[in-house]
Image: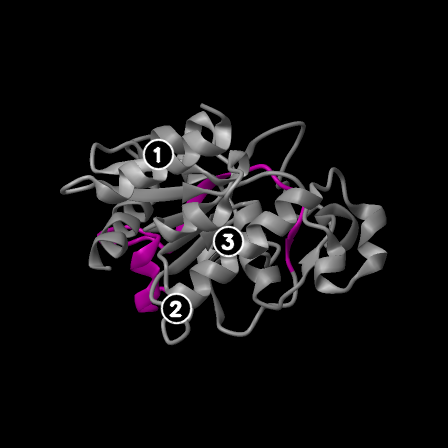
Amino acid sequence: MNKISYLFFIIILLSCTPNKKKNILLSKASFNYEKWLEDENYNILNAYQSNNLDSLLSITDGIVLTGGEDINPLLYDNATNLDLCETINHYRDTLEKLIFDYAFNNSIPTIGICRGMQMINVAAGGSLYADIPTQIGNAVTHRNNGEVNHSIYLVDPQNTYNSLIFPKNDTTSSFNVNSWHHQGLNDLAKGVIVLARSNDMLPEAIVLDSNLHPFMIAVQFHPERLGGNNGISITMRDNFFKAINKK
């Protein structure tokens, strides 16, 4: 059986199984994301290795746009940022823009992580800083030969959207998170609401206005690597599952 035939077989099997599991589509899968979302009620699908994205999207109940390479600044009409970018994956840019459009148009619950948060903003009409140290400065270290940690703060502790990402019973308005990126959100797309920022004012957590989409949240850090007992990691995962099961 060739790869394409095997994919169609899996799709038919997943869509016809009684009491079938829900399907979560990762834009590009890796062990940490799969482990974070591991649950007997969900199948994890990998868009990056698919030869038929349309078929996968047709059975998708939830989407995670994952971390990775820099986004091509031509997607937000800024050729000058090209010189500040590192690796650009054109195939992935195209893939994730298609996934975002499907998620937006079909109200599919969606999480963006690191690059995924940046892609949500770009795909919705916003722009990025191509290199934070060059364009913003070094007031906050967002990476240093790998992952680092820094604090973030809630923009408005009373914002009801906060509970989609941050633990309800946590009375603090600042959190310590991991960080591994050199790009960040610049101009915000219509409907993007910033819930948390780092001390250099860069957005660290966002939500899309629920009037535009019922559940689209994103963070610049990596909840899948914060550990199983971390309140943010648990809150995001649980709310994502709840949003999927409401559909």
Say if the magenta span includes residue 12: no
Which label sits in the foreground, 1 or 2?
A: 1
Q: Amino acid at mark 1?
A: Ile
The part of the chain drawn in magenta is 156-185
Q: Helix, strand, or loop for circle 1?
A: helix
For the residues labelled 1 and 2, the Cα–Cα distance comes to: 29 Å
x and y, in percent, of residue 123 in the image: 59, 61
Q: Quadrant of the C terminus?
A: bottom left
Residue shown at the point (14%, 42%) measured from the top left: 19
Q: Quadrant of the N terminus?
A: top left
| Residue 234 visible at all | no
Q: Which residue is mark 3?
A: 99
Using the image, determine if residue 78 lies above or below residue 204: below
Which one is earlier in the sequence, the residue at label 1 or at label 2? 1
Q: Residues within 10 Å of mark 1 (few under 14, many from 20)?
A: few
x and y, in percent, of residue 72 in the image: 72, 51
Q: Helix, strand, or loop for circle 3?
A: helix
Left or right, 79 with respect to 144, comes to right
Q: Which residue is mark 1?
A: 10
x and y, in percent, of residue 104 in the image: 45, 64
**Mark 1 and 3 residues: CB-CB less than 8 Å, in contact?**
no
* Numbered label tally: 3
Q: Which residue is mark 2?
A: 213
